[in-house]
Image (tube, rainbow, N blue to C red):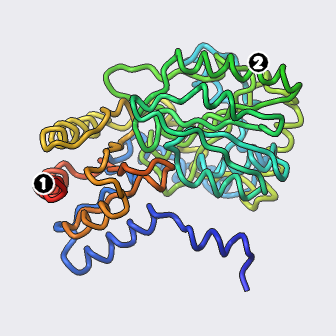
Amino acid sequence: MIAEQMREQVKNSSVIRAMFEEGKRLAEIYGSENVFDFSLGNPNVAPPEAVKEAILEIINSEEAMNIHGYMNNSGYEEVRRAIANSINQKFGTDFTQDNIVMTVGAAGGLNVIFKTLLNPEDEVITFAPFFGEYRNYVSNYQAKLLTVSPNTLDFQPHLEEFQDKISPKTKAVIINSPNNPTGVIYSEATIIKLASILRAKQKEFNSHIYLISDEPYRELAYDNIEVPYLTKYYENTIVAYSFSKSLSLPGERIGYLLIPPSVSDYENVLAASNIATRILGFVNAPSLFQRVIARCLEAKVDIDTYNRNRELLYQSLLSFGYECIKPQGAFYLFVKTPIEDDLEFCQRAKQKKILLVPGTSFGCPGYVRIAYCVAYQTIEKALPGFKELINECK
């Protein structure tokens, strides 16, 4: 018999992954060109050429036999140093290799830092809509995820409600900007107010509250909008970063935690993160791709492709009568469903061979997420189905 906790998680398995698998099933029946899968945030833009060049250069080097072995649990020193220097150049910070822990993607990083920080019954707060796996990551350590209700006007966080939900049990707050699923970037004004609330609550409860910034979409921002770097606004910030989207490498599972020296109990947090990396079974981040990304820190994917998709899908859906806030980053549209039941709407969409993810999965019913990291032609071919859908719902 499987564990009771896993029984519940199997029951509530990821809707995103389930829809992705459904897409593969339908493609086998109808042909992939006739199935419009907008379910999974799987980049369709090729990695920068620098990635391929780095891989070949590394595996053909004289030191090729040394690239597949163990290293410090934090990762290669030279890789961490390169990342710290890159962050400092971009954001005017002063980090060193000792502030970087290489991780198995941002998801691995989040599990490492939650393992490091959370005791049973501790509370973690996040803002709806949010990436649904946060529930599982927090429950892995017998802590509780509290959600702040969505502000569907502009999807900036409801800070008054957030303030009321902070308690002596609050250990961490997790935010994701640019946001999955809305594509919204939290404004500097939002971040400043959020940081002020956290400082006041730490003082009120004589506690340490860590702000965890989940940043896989940082480089995917449009219209020259700046994404605030949170360590500059709140001392107790820890950053979980992934190269999955910025370099189109989701399957390689490579990222890092940034743990600034300003965080409370810094030395113990850093030491525990290294141990958590090992005892969670990661041991270390993938050795080859640590070296690859160290050579590609200034490389970027061509986000013009995503922007072209964004404009076509957003403008077309508005013209059909859908309601949606224009995303400022990432590669998702979060669209209000023309009927109240978002689950039912997804079923109707599937009849048109259009695969969407219900907003219920993100703690925001009445919406659907559309991942537009697909071929431009896929969007073009799916548009008549979207138009038929809304007309049938009137």
Label at residue 38: none
Place of residue 64 in the rendered image (x, y in percent of width and height, measured from the top left): 60, 54
Task: Residue type at mark 2: give it.
Answer: Ala
Q: 212 or 220, which is in the foreground?
A: 212
Task: Residue type at mark 1: give it.
Answer: Asn
Label at residue 200: 2
Distance between the Cα atoms at labels 1 and 2? 50 Å
Place of residue 105 in the rendered image (x, y in percent of width and height, measured from the top left): 59, 49
- Whether residue 78 can be seen here: no
Is 78 situated left or right of 372 in this image? right
Ranked by sequence position, the earlier of labels 1 and 2 is: 2
Viewport quadrant of the N terminus: bottom right
Is 245 situated left or right of 201 in this image? left
Circle 2 packing at 10 Å, graded few (<14), some (14-19), many (20+), is few
Q: Residue furthest bottom?
A: 1
Place of residue 311 in the rendered image (x, y in percent of width and height, measured from the top left): 21, 35
- Residue under pointer 1: 391
The residue depicted at 17 percent of the width and 53 percent of the height is: 390
The residue depicted at 38 percent of the width and 45 percent of the height is: 47
The relative height of residue 177 versus residue 11 in the rendered view (above or below) is above
Q: Which label lies toward us, 1 or 2?
A: 1
**Image quarter for residue 200?**
top right
> Which SS class for mark 1?
helix
The residue depicted at 35 percent of the width and 51 percent of the height is: 368
Place of residue 272 in the rendered image (x, y in percent of width and height, measured from the top left): 85, 44
The residue depicted at 77 percent of the width and 31 percent of the height is: 209
**Image quarter for residue 31?**
bottom left
